[in-house]
Image (tube, rainbow, N blue to C red):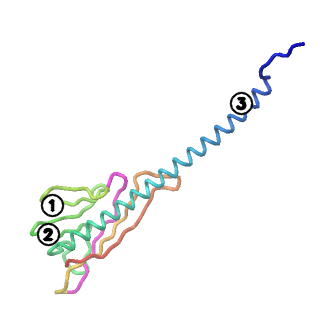
Amino acid sequence: MKKNKGFTIVEMLVYMGLLTGFLVVLTQIFLSSLDVQLATERTSSVAADGRYILSRLEYDVARAQSITVPVALGGLADSLQLTIAGIPHTYQVDNGTLSLVNALGTNALNGVGSRVSGFSVQRLGNAGGKESARVSFILTSTTEGPIGPEVRTYQTTIGVR
């Protein structure tokens, strides 16, 4: 008697079960790697924007002749205005974007991957001394992960040279 070569239905079901399990495991690995990539992008976006904003503030304040807003020592404001080469430069937050407004126009200082909130400036120093200010703000990523968005608080003290 001749045997037909081929697969039985039981062998096919075992094969399909193993293949399904393998595909489920691969899908979970793929989804996990996407979550890690998105989390890395959120963290990187917030960190890069924070470093850029702090560097820009330090650069502009160091070359400024004066800090005009906040006006009084110890005063608080939700914007920072400097005079650089006789031209006012104003830092202010509008709809989550920190903008620098000067004679050349308006420039956004944070990217689309983050929002700025809680921007506050306190004027520091002594009467007759060098002008300085404490700047603080919160950066939040625009995308959310399983545990929420990336949130970082930044604070620096900067002074006119």
Q: Which residue is mark 1?
A: 102
Magenta region includes residue 59: no
The answer to whether 21 is drawn above or below residue 107 in the figure is above
- In the rendered structure, which amino acid carries the disc numbered 1? Asn
- In the rendered structure, which amino acid carries the disc numbered 3? Met
Q: Which residue is mark 3?
A: 16
- Residue 126: x and y, percent? 22, 86
**Gap between marks 1 and 2, in whole Å?**
10 Å
Seen in the image, is 153 located left or right of residue 13? left
Q: Within the image, what quadrant is residue 128 found in?
A: bottom left
Q: Residues within 10 Å of mark 3 (few under 14, many from 20)?
A: few
Number of labelled discs?
3
Q: Secondary structure at mark 3?
A: helix
Say whether marks 1 and 2 touch (CB < 8 Å): yes
**Gap between marks 2 and 3, in whole Å?**
72 Å
Q: Which residue is mark 2?
A: 84
Please tell me which of labels 1 and 3 falls first in the chain: 3
Main secondary-structure element of the magenta-colored stretch: strand
Q: Within the image, what quadrant is residue 2 found in?
A: top right
Which residue occupies the extreme top position in the image? 1
Which span is picked out in magenta?
111-126
The quarter of the image holding the C terminus is: bottom left
- Residue 134: x and y, percent? 29, 75
Q: Secondary structure at mark 2?
A: strand
Q: Residues within 10 Å of mark 2 (few under 14, many from 20)?
A: some
Say whether marks 2 and 3 touch (CB < 8 Å): no
Which label lies toward us, 2 or 3?
3
- In the rendered structure, which amino acid carries the disc numbered 2? Ile
